[in-house]
Image (cartoon, helix red, strand yellow):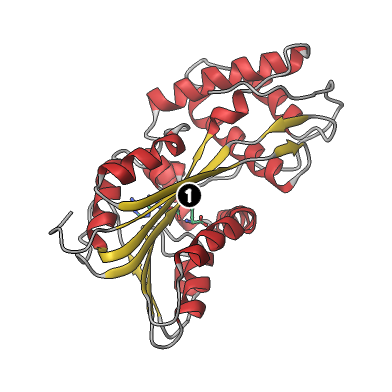
Amino acid sequence: MSEAVFYTRKPKDIVSPIPILQCCFFEVIGLSEEKYVGYVHSGKEYDSELDRLERQASIFEPTTIRHLETMGITEGWKCLEVGAGTGPTARWLSNRVGSKGRVVATDIDMRFLERLNIPNLEVRRHDILKDDLERDEYDLVHCRKLLEHLPDPEKALKKMAHAVRPGGWLLVEEDDYGSMLSVDVTDPSAVSLTAALRRSFDSILKRSPVNPHFGRRLRGLVEGLGFVEVGNEGWTCMTRGGDPLAQLIATDMQLTSRLITIPAGVVTQEEADKYCRLILDPTFYYPCYTFFSAWGRKPIGEGRT
Ligand SMILES: C[S@@+](CC[C@H](N)C(=O)[O-])C[C@H]1O[C@@H](n2cnc3c(N)ncnc32)[C@H](O)[C@@H]1O
């Protein structure tokens, strides 16, 4: 991984406006039954998670749509969106494929998808690791920010690949926090943040199903499935504290600190608070994680994947 240099200044007294939010970590890690139940049933958490997922989608959806447009998605396509969250891509797909097409949006958490009432959209409660999927059925199968959370991402990807019809497309998009480890070696606070991030990512990888470096594996995995016309791209940018993206990063950081890295003794609460203030400091610039997309086409006439 290349080490880019970035510029930083010392943090000022900025208080994080972001409450500790719960997200799909609770579902997949199952760290505490109490937290799991709270996530699923609390109205307040519903709003927080809805807000987080919608803010996240507004940042990454344009990249997804650009890739879908390049694939030539058009009227009449049959599409599958796995781990659809609040369904932004499913909504876009439904509109694009029109009344002659069909979209299936799946998730283990139906709270947000259930709200959608679109004639050519089927919402389906479905666990990609446990439940069956159609074979050789869809013109497009897509997921975003799903595999990185799963205990067996290869199994999930294989099932998604099976669901693509011969000649159809698979598009998978996942994060990789490698680019956040870059550092301005002249800035002590940046150096210490980078060291803490490195320790934290190692700990998250060891102590949970979440893989903070999953994005870099996508191309190899899609090629390994025998798909052709494989392409990939990574998106990143310089982030500044206060950017919408910085707020998402801080939210995730607070969550993983509370669930994993503080209990594991990797960082103290004080350190976690300090790094979070840094992430939100409008005078602090840092490279965002990389959002990797990889795509490929299922070969025609070579039997089942
Ligand atoms: C980070 S969110 C991303 C949501 C959406 N793809 C987006 O980008 O806006 C991950 C989603 O995956 C869902 N999920 C987690 N584990 C899953 C599983 N085993 N099967 C299906 N969906 C799952 C979560 O409920 C959550 O909605």
Q: What residue lies at 28% left-to-right and 51% top-to-bottom? A: 227
In this view of the protein, can residue 33 be seen by the observer? no
Q: What residue lies at 76% left-to-right and 42% top-to-bottom? A: 17
Residue 294 in the image: x percent, y percent?
43, 48
Horizontally, is 184 left or right of 22 in the view?
right
Q: Is residue 90 above or below residue 286?
A: below
Q: How many numbered discs?
A: 1
Horizontally, is 283 left or right of 99 in the view?
right
Question: Which amino acid is tagged 1?
Answer: Gly
Q: Is residue 201 above or below residue 146?
A: above
For residue 128, what is the image quadrant?
bottom left
Q: Nearer the viewer, residue 85 or 133?
A: 133
Q: Secondary structure at mark 1?
A: helix
Q: Is residue 293 above or below residue 276?
A: below
Residue 88 in the image: x percent, y percent?
54, 66
What residue sits right under mark 1 in the picture?
A: 38
Residue 69 in the image: x percent, y percent?
52, 67
Q: What residue lies at 23% left-to-right and 63% top-to-bottom? A: 133
In this view of the protein, can residue 62 be seen by the observer? yes
Q: What residue lies at 24% left-to-right and 48% top-to-bottom? A: 226
Q: Nearer the viewer, residue 244 or 7?
A: 7
- Mark 1, ligand 1, within 8 Å: the answer is no
Q: Residue furthest left?
A: 303
Q: Nearer the viewer, residue 280 or 133?
A: 133
Residue 125 in the image: x percent, y percent?
33, 65
- Categorize mark 1 by other alpha carbons within 10 Å: few (<14), some (14-19), many (20+): some
Horizontally, is 269 left or right of 137 in the view?
right
For residue 298, what is the image quadrant?
bottom left
